[in-house]
Image (spheres, rainbow, N blue to C red):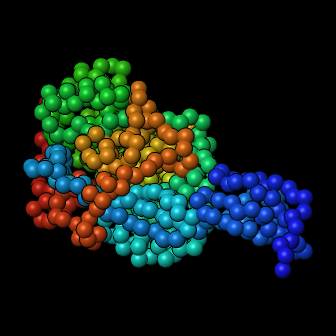
Amino acid sequence: MSEPQAEPGVPLSLHRGVTAGFWYCVGEKCCFSYQLRCDNLTIDSPCASPATVGSPLQRTCRVKIDRVEAINLVYKYPPPGGFRYAGGMCTGRVTTIILVHTDSGEIGVGSVYSHPALVHLIVEKQLDELLRGQDPTQVEELWQKMAAITLWYGRKGAAVSALGGVDTALWDLRGKAAGKPVWQLLGGERPECPAYASGLLWNDIDALAAEATAHVEAGFRRVKMRLARSEAFDREAVKAVRASIGPNCDIMVDTSMRYHLELARRMGRFFAEQGVFWYEEPFAPDDIDAYCALRGTVSVPISAGENEFGLQGFRELIRAGAVDIVQPDASRCGGISEVRRVALLAAEHGLRIATHSWSDAVAITANAHVVAAAPNGITVEVDRTTLPFIDQLLVEPLDIRDGQLQLSGAPGLGIELNFEVVDRYRMADPLDLPLGSYSDMMFGKEHFPQPFEYVEDRG
């Protein structure tokens, strides 16, 4: 049978990476006359009904999810450990990288900060099978499917964090399919996001002052410090850091959920005198009544949210009037989709958002895309505790200039993983985490937090 002759055709509205081609039709069958490439997927004479002639290529070039992969990473600080803080001595760090593989060869990248073994099981034993064959650009629909399948044991904690890592990877793929960066898909106009240096843990006062100065010299204009050691230390540390960075840079304080209401009010007045920009987690996340009682009695904005999950959790925090600034994290609260929804809810209540990040450069970047696009977005957190998951994980490291994290104009998240670093820190057994204190998670009795008495100065 001879090849049908191509009738005078109409050039197709072609996508990025597609060579020119023309439709030809024989009866009810319409095909391309030439082979073309679409997002690395070779298509030879795809066929469609005449109604689709001249329609966008995605109607005939639909990428599908091939598999979803969770890679657990662990980093152990050299003895005696990485840093001292309210939880004790941190001996290592963990994170989970999520890769959504497609049949085109394109890969979406996300990350999760939670119990590594639980995340691995949820992703590879449930979400992977759920998502295979699905269109990765249908992000909202797939979020709902993942939420529904994990509902009975999920809604908060590791399950919503796990699906959030997948969600972030899907946004990466959606941006790549559209040929646009995620910040632009979300309505952003500028490829940058304010960023602050997060560190300043328990140390000598002089060392804290020197560290704060170094962060400013590195391009940051805001720094966050951890307190809750003693009232005398907390006061002296804040004074020293303020003196070291001057009046034109901001200080944020994290009091690690160790204050009671009377102390929180007293310290709040002191923080106001020192020009503190925000006052983070004075109480445990479930003690919403204490937050409500504190807010409005001190002039420093109250912030919380790193230990909250899902829109429903933030809805409770916001509707109660507990905080001035909410702190979702794409690697914990449900991905880019959920951070975006939290930002919209906060805006409806006249509140601002400043995302939490304490795990890896993928999470920082994902959070930054949302903050950059949100009118009520303030800043994104950048861990400065000398962590390879921050400093070495990406081929192009995070770029901070004059207090701004530079975002790529490349499609998706605009990042590329350094797989040599991924392989170096990959856990041999994803379900067997070595004993240690991983900043927010402790395994092994010797690493559990020890009894601690916060010494107050009631003067």
Is 437 rendered above or below residue 4?
above
User: Looking at the figure, which quarter contains the C terminus?
Assistant: top left
Q: Residue at x 42, y 61 (%)?
A: 98
Q: Residue at x 41, y 77 (%)?
A: 125
Q: Residue furthest front?
A: 2
Given residues 61 and 403, the one toward you in this image is 61
Q: Is residue 322 visible?
A: no
Q: Residue at x 63, y 64 (%)?
A: 42
User: Looking at the figure, which quarter contains the N terminus?
Assistant: bottom right
Residue 109 image point, x, y percent:
46, 57
In this rendering, position of residue 86 left or right of residue 371 = left
Given residues 418 and 319, the one toward you in this image is 418
Is 53 rendered above or below residue 367?
below
Q: Residue at x 59, y 68 (%)?
A: 64
Q: Is residue 223 visible?
A: yes
Given residues 149 and 41, the one toward you in this image is 41
Residue 35 image point, x, y percent:
70, 63
Residue 262 image point, x, y percent:
25, 41
Number of numbered discs present?
A: 0
Given residues 65 and 321, the one toward you in this image is 65
Residue 432 image point, x, y percent:
23, 70
